[in-house]
Image (cartoon, grey):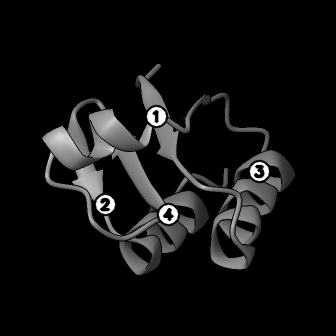
Amino acid sequence: MPEIILYTTHCPLCKGLEKSLQMHNIDYVVCTDKSLMKEMGIHHVPMLSVDGQILTNQQALRWVLSQEK
């Protein structure tokens, strides 16, 4: 199972991606540490890390949909 981290500030877009993860029963960890995000080069949220690969919101939504069985 991949390690999934949601980088979020709980903005409306972030909440939408989080809801999508929940609806698809995908386990994830939430990171709200803005300093860490800045260090990682994350300047926009939400971002999703899937086994270390950083995905934008659109990429993340496509990835979530691809996880349907």
Element assignment for label 4: loop
Q: Position of residue 69 (x, y in %)?
A: 67, 50
* Residue drawn 43% across the image and 80% down it: 58
Which image quadrant for residue 45?
A: bottom left
* Residue drawn 70% across the image and 51% down it: 21
Between the residue at mark 1 and the residue at mark 4, the CA separation in whole angstroms equals 12 Å
Q: Is residue 54 above or below residue 1?
A: below
Q: Disc 1 marks which residue?
A: 33
Q: Disc 4 marks which residue?
A: 46
* Residue drawn 42% across the image and 23% down it: 3
- Specify few, some or many for label 1: CA neighbours under 10 Å numbering under 14, 14-19, or 20 or more: few
Which image quadrant for residue 52?
A: top left
Between the residue at mark 4 and the residue at mark 2, the CA separation in whole angstroms equals 9 Å
Q: Is residue 5 above or below residue 29?
A: below
For badge 2, the amino acid type reads Leu
Which mark identifies residue 55?
2
Q: Disc 3 marks which residue?
A: 24
